[in-house]
Image: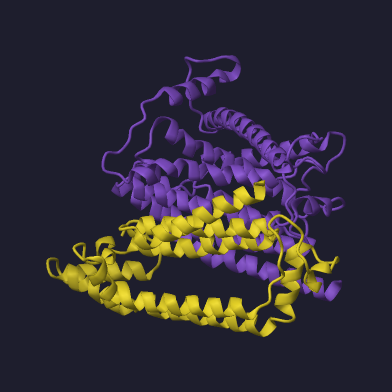
Amino acid sequence: MSGAWLAFAALTGMVLYSGYKVVTSPLITHAALYLATALVGVAGFFLMLESEFLAVVQVLVYVGAVMTVIIFAIMLSDVPALQGDPQATLVSRLLSRRFGSVPALVSAGVLALVLIGYGSVRWAAAPLGGAPEAVHPLLHDTTAQGSTGVIGRALFTTYLVPFEVASLLLLAAMVGAIVLTRRERGAAEKAAAGKAGAGAAAAAPAVEGAAEERGGAQFWP
Amino acid sequence: MQPEWMAPWLWTLILAVVKTIVVIAFVSLNAAVLIWLERKVSGHMQNRVGPLRVGGPAGILQSVADIIKLLAKEDFVPQRGDRWIWWLAPSVAFAPAFLVFWVLPFGPHLVVEDFNVGLIFITAVTSFTLLSIFMAGWGSNDKYSLIGAMRAGAQLFSYEIPMAMALVAVALATGTLNLTAIVEKQRHMWLIVPQILAFLVFYISSVAELNRTPFDLAEAESELVAGYHTEYSGIRWSMFFFAEYTNLLTSSALAAILFLGGWHGPWLPGWAWLLIKTYLLVFVGMWIRWTLPRVRIDQLMDLGWKFLLPVSLVNIAATGLYLVVVR
């Protein structure tokens, strides 16, 4: 048994166990933290494949960005509502649309897609910890800086169109998020006025609103 | 160096352990020195008297007394917190501060791990900080901790983006992600000259990410007791403290490496130059902390999103244009 085998076994155990706990944890916060562990484990696999760029980007994107958004969503939401019915059994949980069947179907679809993708590519077979049998011609490119250069070049030549399409998709998602969360200025003030106006004189909220309009200039509202 | 009889992976493991011990020793020593320096700087700047009983030359023994006190203090555990998460948070907070150290080059061959993608590695490992803040805030089961964690998270998130953009400009200008190579490119001119905008964005963002005054809304004592580490005491609290001082050191060292020519300088050996530049920036960080008042939350967000981010984007565009047109 070599060090590579030990590392591989440890990483696999870590990823599989955390993946299992992501699905079965009763608390969504625990699920989020297990998800982060699983994603870091995948970065470990990339490191073992000597693809340091992918490993680092995996951590940067999944722990740095995706987990951040998930954590913010959890902190800003009502945790008991996310947990669903505490009395539910496994079967009733699987049958419920929000907590069982629809997520399961979507996950199964994604899994099938990924498996089809894996099946259609011919992978260079390599023994663990040994040299690969056949190396992709791109990897012989000595002018590039390791895997970073190879990926960068491929991204901006062969895969330029998918890359641009993905960035457009992200831009559309960003615009959508802004539209969804944007509050009308007048509406928010009206709501505040309605609340305050119930007890206080009608003039008071109007003055407050005017102070807000002037921006942060006034320190004491 | 490797003995014949030893398996290569065992040798790698032993080397890793030795390197870890060396880095931890340096980082610990640095924290003790910085505590002393912070007391000195704050005392002189705000004209106030510090602790007097434990003296030694220039009050240097006070740090030792502090460390002994923190180690001996009662370790208070919140009864209804989320035990495991609460327990792990300080270690997760310390890990990124310590990992960044692995790729910082102190000289042409004086680096723990000469990582090819060091620049992205740094942005990647620092993202664990947010996870630790969330774990501390959530695990404590306390409103001050949770609000502090929310604020700290929003702040980290907002300043991580301009900081990464400043680093993109550095990578563009030097054409590499390897920190040793970046310093090597600054042999004739420090990067701060062409990339002054990136330096300013990077430095302001790194001060903001440290959650120190004037950006200490996350632990504003007057409102939030102590923010996300309200429920921590003794050795666990000192882990957070330790992480803060290590982060101060690493972000200053990174600024020195990326923009101030790293180990380059006349007469003195390289590592001495880097330490001088680093501690100069650390001093500037303390100077900022003890002279400026805390900003408001809207000012904080405006500075990050409406000023630093556009500036760094313009800087990237200008750098790219320069590379295309001039070269």
Q: Quadrant of residue A76?
A: bottom left
Q: Where residue A113 sits in the image (x, y, percent)?
A: 52, 80
Residue furthest to the left in view is A199
Q: Where residue A134 sits in the image (x, y, percent)?
A: 78, 69
Seen in the image, is B63 located left or right of residue B76?
right
Residue furthest to the front in view is A1
Seen in the image, is B97 located left or right of residue B182?
left
Task: Please identify which colour was used for chain B in the image.
Answer: purple
Any part of residue A183 in sight: no
Q: Nearer the viewer, residue B201 or B117?
A: B117
Any part of residue A124 in sight: yes
B56 over A2 or under it: above or below: above
Q: Nearer the viewer, residue A108 or B140?
A: A108
Give the image's coloring scheme.
by chain
Q: Nearer the viewer, residue B310 or A161?
A: A161
Q: Where residue A176 sits in the image (x, y, percent)?
A: 44, 81
Q: Quadrant of residue A92?
A: bottom left
Q: Which chain is yellow?
A: A
Q: Quadrant of the N terminus of chain B?
A: top right
Q: Quadrant of residue B118?
A: bottom right
B52 over A99 or under it: above or below: above
Residue at 21% across / 62% down in the picture?
A: A86
Q: Nearer the viewer, residue B273 or B285?
A: B273
Q: Where residue B74 sits in the image (x, y, percent)?
A: 36, 26
Seen in the image, is B195 located left or right of residue A182?
right
How many dots with numbers? 0
A195 over B37 or under it: above or below: below
Q: Quadrant of the C terminus of chain B?
A: bottom right
